[in-house]
Image (cartoon, rainbow, N blue to C red):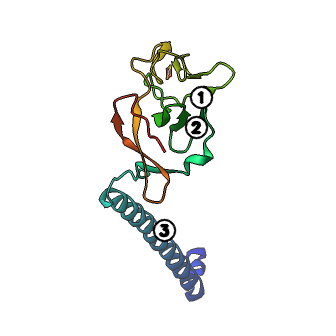
Amino acid sequence: MSEEKKNTPAERSAEAGLDVNRRAFFVKLGLGSLSIAAAGTAAFSYQFLSPNVLFEPAPIVNAGKPENYALDSVTLDANTGIYLIHAKEGFFAMSAVCTHLGCLTAWKPELGIIACPCHGSKFYVFEDKKTPGEKIEGPAPKPLPWLQTWISDEGDLMVDRSVIIRPMQFVRV
Ligand code: FES
């Protein structure tokens, strides 16, 4: 008797409605999952297919007018990792990157040397009978390299960080 009451048309349609709702819910859930998976695949594919290139700044640096550099001055450009040095013999540029493990060195005016903060390498700058960049002490295996430096047609000091030159080649203005 009670079985018959549960199967009235109204109950059956309510049950069917619930079924439809449940089915619609699972369909939406499935579509949502597929959309997330497709978006993840698309993002991964884009990353995989796009060129894996490292854009580095240009190696040539315009260091400005020579008159901006006082005699016996050592100017660090931390952005490009170079020292622009005005010695009595002329101008020259050295890499400021330590030859040990690549830390950025620092000019110590109170000591008159360049020092590396990482493991204590020290380098000459204005010492008599010493080549600027030569190591004083520390684990650095090589001196700080001199970089190609010249005066542009506009009268600016130019440095090519990609070209290492023999030391003691000064630019005279
Ligand atoms: S990186 Fe300069 S001494 Fe180690």
Residue at screen point 33% across, 53% down: 52
Instruction: Tell which residue pokes out farthest to the right in this image.
Output: 110
Work out which quarter of the rendered image holds the N terminus and state it: bottom right
Residue annotated with mark 2: 76
Q: Nearer the viewer, residue 97 or 20?
A: 97
> Badge 3 local density, few (<14 within 10 Å), some, or many (20+)?
few
Q: Are marks 3 and 2 in contact (CB under 8 Å)?
A: no
Rendered view: 171 above or below 44:
above
Rendered view: 1 above or below 103:
below
Residue annotated with mark 3: 29
Q: Are marks 1 and 2 in contact (CB under 8 Å)?
A: yes
Compute the Cα span from label 1 to label 2.
8 Å
Q: Nearer the viewer, residue 158 or 40?
A: 158
Task: Tell me where residue 100 appears, x and y as whole percent.
Answer: 44, 21
Residue at screen point 48% across, 24% down: 132
Compute the Cα span from label 3 to label 2.
60 Å
Question: Is ligand 1 less than 8 Å from the beta carbon at label 2?
Answer: no
Marked residue nearer the N-terminal end (1 or 2): 2
Q: Are marks 3 and 1 in contact (CB under 8 Å)?
A: no
Q: Nearer the viewer, residue 7 or 98?
A: 98
Rendered view: 82 above or below 46:
above
Task: Tell me where residue 141 appears, x and y as whole percent.
Answer: 39, 17
Residue annotated with mark 1: 106
Marked residue nearer the N-terminal end (3 or 2): 3
